[in-house]
Image: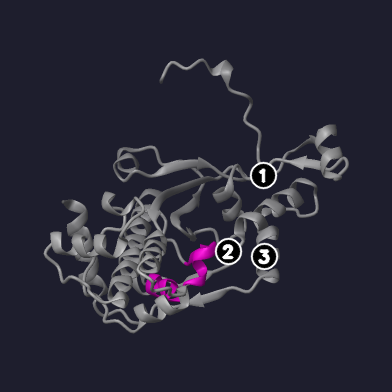
Amino acid sequence: AMGIPTHLFGPVTAPGTPIGVLLPDIAEETGAGEVKVVLPACHDTGSAVVAVPARNQDFAWLSSGTWSIMGAEVKEPALGEKALAYNFTNEGGIFDTWRLSKNIMGLWLVQECRREWGRQGQDLSYDEMTQLAAESDPFLAVINPDDDSFFHPGDMPERIRQFCKRTNQHVPQKKGEVLRVALESLALKYRWVLERTEELSGKRLDPIHIIGGGTKNRLLNQLTADATNRTVVTGPVEATAIGNVLMQAIGLGHLGSLAEAREVVRNSFEVEEYHPGYRDGWDDAYKKLLNLLEK
């Protein structure tokens, strides 16, 4: 479509394919010897999805950290107008699957709040910040986490307040209130992406598997279960490294399938489940988010 000569591209080779051994100079420098080289699942998110400890096929995955990526494992890419309008991506997956997914702002909002308060001489741990948010009143306001005003480093608490002021909402003042607004809004945006992933894939996705460092924020995990009305399963934290190892094991014949690899994850790492609980107020808050996204 773009007139790029296809001879420039190498052959497409499936993840899990052994492609030889380490180059002699690298083998000598590392002392690793003639280690076999196996193609991974493309990149960090691809490897992380391999390590999702799923028991079923129709699940949503959410890679949670400074940034979030949410999606599903599907057999065919979504190439229609809606996928374009929703700004979804289709990435080649493992074993003839595709990762239908969308980027979302993540705990960057919280990290930048912590950095700003640290500049002001108030050093708070993430546990302390989560506790402040948990003790604050729910649904004071809703922000669009992916608004351009939140992308760059800076005074995040003030930017959140300005967004609320600009959209004629209650303006959070206390630290816990600012954090609560940020975390609830992330959970609401996850719901928005989940609904559109289901629309594009034609599947109901349950549970939501959250992987990565963001799994340590238990409040956000519970808010996500409440906002989406789905069970949330968290772990493992180091999913990218684990998925990389699993693809090597499959490629070298130590594991026979993706299902077997995911069973290894379930048997090797502790996972936590969060079930929808407090549902009052979530639908009204979601309507606020939808209104914000339409502007």
The label number, if any, that marks residue 40 in the structure image: 1
The label number, if any, that marks residue 28 in the structure image: none
Residue at 66% over, 70% down: 269
Mark 3 → mark 1, Cα distance in angstroms:
17 Å
Residue 47 seen in this snapshot: yes
188 vs 69, left or right, is left
Q: Given the current orientation, which residue lies at the most extreme left position?
A: 168
Judge the density around disc 1: few (<14), some (14-19), many (≥20) Cα neighbours within 10 Å.
many
Q: Are marks 1 and 2 in contact (CB under 8 Å)?
A: no
Q: Point out the stretch of residues depicted in magenta.
A: 207-225
Mark 1 → mark 2, Cα distance in angstroms:
19 Å
Judge the density around disc 2: few (<14), some (14-19), many (≥20) Cα neighbours within 10 Å.
many
105 vs 73, left or right, is left
The label number, if any, that marks residue 265 in the structure image: 3
Residue at 85% over, 33% down: 24
Element marked by disc 1 = loop
Q: Which residue type does callout 1 highlight?
A: Pro
Is residue 224 inside the magenta stretch? Answer: yes
Please name which of the two marks, 1 or 2, marks the residue nearer to the observer. Answer: 1
With respect to residue 281, does 190 lie above or below?
Answer: above
Q: Which residue type does callout 3 highlight?
A: Val
Task: Check disc 2 and report the residue beneath it.
Answer: 54
244 vs 291, left or right, is right
